[in-house]
């Protein structure tokens, strides 16, 4: 059989079909879709606590990148770093040496937040309440203080009420535990965002987390709901990741975002430059995924 000579169109078509070309055209499609949309701004401040007592599931990465994505779209956003590790402060390029006035002074020393919040160099409307190593002692010190579960809530309410401009979003990055710091975060928020890593033990500990949230809702904060679940570090090449993602979607069909955050080297590199992936490599798949997740969160919270 005689094969036809390849025409110019055919040869271009053949190039288009390489994995690299497909990936590039997919990235372009996603960039254009993101550029075409304007995100709604909430009429009142949305306070989201990012929590999961499992370590290393992507709480901090999710906090700083969603915050940056929303700030990039024009929202005023505050990140409260409630982890003594101070990782969120680092990723947002915020000073947090041990002598820095920090969230510790707000919670334990009743220092008003207004003088402690710093502006992030990442985006014009992005702010951070930093954490320092002193916060490590706060779990113990809180025990003997009055209203020990409400201290962050009281400070944040006062700050938001006195702020001349509306903050559209506050994200609280929790440590990997269910101690008093995390309880303070639950009491200060209306929404909980749970990042879940697409790995074998993903669902372990989740029922304990949900029970704790229910207790807080019953006794300390009746408006608290788990509004959002985000699947992180997803590797589409493994069956396991697909299965975990499907399991979580089956259990929480209304909370899980459609967007999955892929495992990405660019995401893990960004903090070492004191940056979010949104500014470090805007067009990487990791950045696009966080921009898409942020858009979903903004649209879900918009008044109907
Ligand atoms: N999508 C991703 N792709 C690749 N690496 C990631 C991704 N998300 C997070 N990481 C990396 O995984 C590690 C844990 O992430 P992160 O610090 O966000 O988790 P965490 O839940 O806040 O941890 P901790 O419980 O210690 O506070 C970090 O080194 C981070 O850079
Ligand atoms: Mg963290």
Image: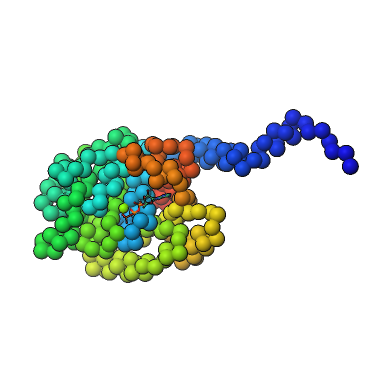
Position of 64 compared to 83: left or right?
A: right
**Front one among 223 and 131:** 131
**Near-viewer residue (289 or 158):** 289
Question: Which image quadrant for residue 16?
Answer: top right
Question: What residue lies at 40% left-to-right and 39% top-to-bottom?
Answer: 278
- Residue 141 position, x and y percent, is 12, 60
Vertical order, 105 against 187 (above or below): above
> With 5 as the anchor, is 92 left or right in this view?
left
Instruction: List x then y, in percent, for residue 109.
Output: 10, 51
* Quarter-of-image position of residue 167: top left
Question: Number of labelled discs?
Answer: 0
- Residue 9's place in the image compared with 292, above or below, is above
Q: Dividing the image into 4 quarters, which one contains the N terminus?
A: top right
Residue 8 visible to the viewer: yes
The image shows residue 192 at horizontal and vertical percentages of 33, 58
Q: Give the residue drawn at x 16%, y 45%.
A: 98
Residue at 37% over, 41% down: 270
């Amino acid at each position: 059989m005689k094969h036809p000579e390849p025409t110019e169109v055919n040869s271009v078509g053949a190039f288009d079909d390489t994995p690299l070309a497909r990936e590039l055209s997919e990235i372009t499609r996603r960039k254009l879709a993101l550029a075409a949309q304007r995100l709604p701004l909430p009429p009142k401040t949305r306070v989201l606590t990012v929590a999961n007592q499992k370590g290393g599931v992507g709480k901090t990465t999710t906090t700083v990148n969603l915050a940056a994505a929303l700030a990039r779209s024009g929202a005023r956003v505050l990140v409260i770093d409630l982890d003594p590790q101070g990782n969120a402060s680092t990723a947002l390029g915020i000073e947090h040496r041990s002598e820095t006035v920090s969230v510790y002074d707000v919670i334990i020393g009743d220092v008003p937040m207004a003088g402690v919040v710093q502006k992030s160099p990442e985006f014009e409307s992005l702010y951070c309440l930093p954490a320092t190593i002193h916060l490590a002692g706060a779990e113990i010190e809180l025990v003997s203080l009055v209203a020990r579960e409400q201290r962050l809530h009281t400070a944040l309410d006062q700050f938001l009420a006195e702020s001349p401009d509306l903050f559209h979003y506050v994200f609280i990055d929790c440590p990997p535990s269910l101690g008093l710091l995390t309880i303070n975060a639950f009491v200060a928020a209306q929404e909980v965002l749970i990042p879940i890593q697409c790995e074998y033990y993903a669902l372990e500990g989740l029922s304990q987390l949900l029970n704790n949230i229910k207790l807080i809702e019953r006794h300390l904060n009746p408006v608290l709901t788990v509004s959002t679940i985000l699947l992180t570090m997803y590797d589409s090449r493994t069956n396991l990741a697909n299965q975990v993602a499907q399991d979580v979607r089956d259990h929480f069909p209304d909370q899980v975002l459609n967007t999955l955050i892929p495992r990405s080297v660019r995401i893990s590199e960004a903090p070492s430059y004191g940056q979010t992936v949104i500014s470090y490599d805007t067009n990487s798949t990791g950045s696009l995924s966080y921009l898409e997740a942020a858009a979903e969160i903004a649209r879900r919270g918009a008044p109907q």
